[in-house]
Amino acid sequence: MNIQLKVLLAIKNCKVNLTNKARRTGIWENFGQSEVRHLEDKYRDYEYKEKDAWDLIKKFDSWCMNFNDKDIY
């Protein structure tokens, strides 16, 4: 399987889980940062080899930082 597709699927799962968790408990400081760090650690080897896959992680990081209560519903 293509590494970019693996990263995309992992991000999609994280987004669904984070959105559901935000619905239950609300949004907190550093929302999603542990998930971003996990993805960065998991795919660290591809930081320079697969720039597109790494850019997806950075876009997910931006999504987490800009997530607000309007995005929950």
Image (tube, helix red, strand yellow):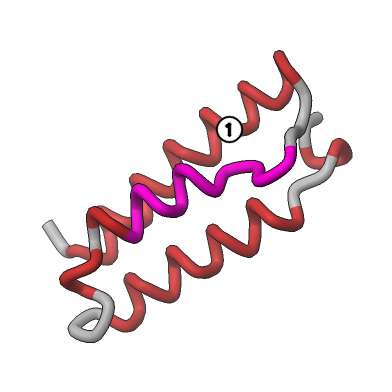
Where does residue 42 sit, x and y in percent of width and height?
23, 54
Where does residue 8 sit, x and y in percent of width and height?
37, 55
Q: Quadrant for residue 73, please give it.
A: top right
Q: Residue furthest top?
A: 24
The local secondary structure at tag 1 comes to: helix
In the displayed structure image, the side of residue 24 where residue 55 appears, left or right: left
Where does residue 12 sit, x and y in percent of width and height?
45, 44
Q: Residue furthest right?
A: 70
| Point 28% across, 57% down: residue | 41
| Point 27% across, 58% down: residue | 5
Q: Quadrant for residue 59, please give it.
A: bottom right
In the displayed structure image, the side of residue 30 where residue 73 appears, left or right: right
Vertical relation: 54 (above or below) 70: below
40 vs 1, nearest the viewer: 40
Pointer 1: what residue?
Answer: 18
| Point 56% across, 60% down: residue | 61
Where does residue 72 sit, x and y in percent of width and height?
77, 32
Q: Residue furthest front?
A: 29
Vertical relation: 43 (above or below) 46: above
Vertical relation: 29 (above or below) 73: below
Helix, strand or loop: magenta stretch:
helix
Q: Is residue 9 magenta?
A: no
Q: Amino acid at mark 1?
A: Leu
Vertical relation: 62 (above or below) 51: above
| Point 65% across, 42% down: residue | 31
In the displayed structure image, the side of residue 6 where residue 65 appears, left or right: right
Q: Which residues are magenta?
A: 29-40
Q: Quadrant of the N terminus?
A: bottom left
CA neighbours of label 1 inside 10 A, class few (<14), some (14 to 19), many (20+):
many
